[in-house]
Image (cartoon, grey):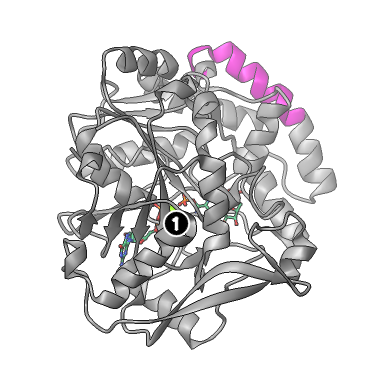
């Protein structure tokens, strides 16, 4: 296998975790490069379900190295819990195979308090964030007042930063947001205590990647969120605060673009979105409910019901362009089984004209109507299919249509949550 990127092409929850777990078999290292514990990546291996928020989805293979890049915002409490949970279930996660970049930013209690209080204050127009403090932490990074993992190794720097930041944050929390102020000493004590446990894991991820690449090792980059939640390219302001797109790997992991080889876009066979924001193909009817129930579409992080709709290829085509996708992995095709008809949206109608690219204006987005290609559905249970030829002709026609409209080959089709419930079309992906 050659170096590979797994990136979400929609609004997150496309099944990136499952695909990363599968592809890890052929990789030496798995790296996350952006986002934080707003992500929830689900793996089902040997009938057991694992959900990862921060640790890369390759961690179940005990001979692989997992790296958390500088581009992430890391809640140390969540990272420690995730390490603990894995150890309890018998998976060894020592510092020899899990490394946190010294330059990653830390989510602090005031980030979570601000995220929650702001959303509450916005009422109906809230973004519907995950409430994990992601946005406020990235704000501090850009404002150059962020606390970084390396600060856990220098207690005096950590304490000074927390006290200085809290003077401003408490003012904002109390006077502007009407929330409770936080106690600096409590935070200092808690972070020093967590720091002692995390320091062994802190390292230089960028140099590790560089050395690994020079030794011919294979690296798998795991995107979180999706292209349309990207702070630049998504449905702004209904987006996250990082750049999930593949181009971010260079800055978020600390490696040059020339090491990237295959860029795999994960496409759910229909569309979902959790949180607020435009969604042209949303189905607010029984078909939407059918997909939501069959797909068990509840958020892996917040447990919220995901909004569901037909496959929107205007969205996916944007992602092909922005990420430079070289292949697609189609997930959750099994969920569409039992529908008499299935629909694909390849363009929108906006004020009487056809548009092929998602408009940047939210007002224009709200006026877009989906133009559908309707296709016959299939009745057969496809979860046992392991080759394309084992799929009903209607399901194959649906896949063919996706390839034709996007112009990108499909390398993998997922027909169930389990690692083995997969049709691998391009064997090079896993060997
Ligand atoms: P991620 O955030 O992109 O990793 O996706 P999530 O884990 O949040 O959501 C995907 C959900 O679909 C998880 O519960 C997976 O176990 C499940 N899943 C993944 N692939 C398939 C599939 O092909 N079929 C079905 N039925 N479920 C799948
Ligand atoms: P994975 O990696 C789906 C959404 C939130 C909200 C918006 C902003 O599992 O695909 P934030 O807390 O990031 O400030 O929230 O982004 N969101 C996700 N939706 N999957 C995710 O990650 C998401 N991470 C953030 O629901 O609408
Ligand atoms: Mg998810």
Residue 399 x/y as whole percent: 35, 65
* Magenta residue span: 152-167
Q: Is residue 267 visible?
A: yes
Q: Main secondary structure of the magenta part?
A: helix
Q: Is residue 336 left or right of residue 298?
A: left
Asked if the residue at label 1 sits under 8 Å from ligand 1, the reply is yes
Left/right of residue 71 with respect to residue 57 in the rendered view: right
Q: Is residue 9 above or below residue 86?
A: below
Seen at 65% across and 69% down, the residue is 348
Instruction: Name the quadrant containing residue 361.
Output: bottom right
x 69%, y 45%: residue: 114
Q: Farthest residue toward the right?
A: 175
Q: Percent from the top left, x then y, of residue 124?
A: 74, 68
Where is 303 relative to 148, above or below?
below
Question: Residue 176 at what x, y percent from top left?
Answer: 84, 46
For the residue labelled by badge 1, is the local secondary structure a helix, a strand or a loop? Answer: loop
Indicate the quadrant of ligand 1 in the picture. bottom left
Residue 120 found in image quarter: bottom right
């Amino acid at each position: 296998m050659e170096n590979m990127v797994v990136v979400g092409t929609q609004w997150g929850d496309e099944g990136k975790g499952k695909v990363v777990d599968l592809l890890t078999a052929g990789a030496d290292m798995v790296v996350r490069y952006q986002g934080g514990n707003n992500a929830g990546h689900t793996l089902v291996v040997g009938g057991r379900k694992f959900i990862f928020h921060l640790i890369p989805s390759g961690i179940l293979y005990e001979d692989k190295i997992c790296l958390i890049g500088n581009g992430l915002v890391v809640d140390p409490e969540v990272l420690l819990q995730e390490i603990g949970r894995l150890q309890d279930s018998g998976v060894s996660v020592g510092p020899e195979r899990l490394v946190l970049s010294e330059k990653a930013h830390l989510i602090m209690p005031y980030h979570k308090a601000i995220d929650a209080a702001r959303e509450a204050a916005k009422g109906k127009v809230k973004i519907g964030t995950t409430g994990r403090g992601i946005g406020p932490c990235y704000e501090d990074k850009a404002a150059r007042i962020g606390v970084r993992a390396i600060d856990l190794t220098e207690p005096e720097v950590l304490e000074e930063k927390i006290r200085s930041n809290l003077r401003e944050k408490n003012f904002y929390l109390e006077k502007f947001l009407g929330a409770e102020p936080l106690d600096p000493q409590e935070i200092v004590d808690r972070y020093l205590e967590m720091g002692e446990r995390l320091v062994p894991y802190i390292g230089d991820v960028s140099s590790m990647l560089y050395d690994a690449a020079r030794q011919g090792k294979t690296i798998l980059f795991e995107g979180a969120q999706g292209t349309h939640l990207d702070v630049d390219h998504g449905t702004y302001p209904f987006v996250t605060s990082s750049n999930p797109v593949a181009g971010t790997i260079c800055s978020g992991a600390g490696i040059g673009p020339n090491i990237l080889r295959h860029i795999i876009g994960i496409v759910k066979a229909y569309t979902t979105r959790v949180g607020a924001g435009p969604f042209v193909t949303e189905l607010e009817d029984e078909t939407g409910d059918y997909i939501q129930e069959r797909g068990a579409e509840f958020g892996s992080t917040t447990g919220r019901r995901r909004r569901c709709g037909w496959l929107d290829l205007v969205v996916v085509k944007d992602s092909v362009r922005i990420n430079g996708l070289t292949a697609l992995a189609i997930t959750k095709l099994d969920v569409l089984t039992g529908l008499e008809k299935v629909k694909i949206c390849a363009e929108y109608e906006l004020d009487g004209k056809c548009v092929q690219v998602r408009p940047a204006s939210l007002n224009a987005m709200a006026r877009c109507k989906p133009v559908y290609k309707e296709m016959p559905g299939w009745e057969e249970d496809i979860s046992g299919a392991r080759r394309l030829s084992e799929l009903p002709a209607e399901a194959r026609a649906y896949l063919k249509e996706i390839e034709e409209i996007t112009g990108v080959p499909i390398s993998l089709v997922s027909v169930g949550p389990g690692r083995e419930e997969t049709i691998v079309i391009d064997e090079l992906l896993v060997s």
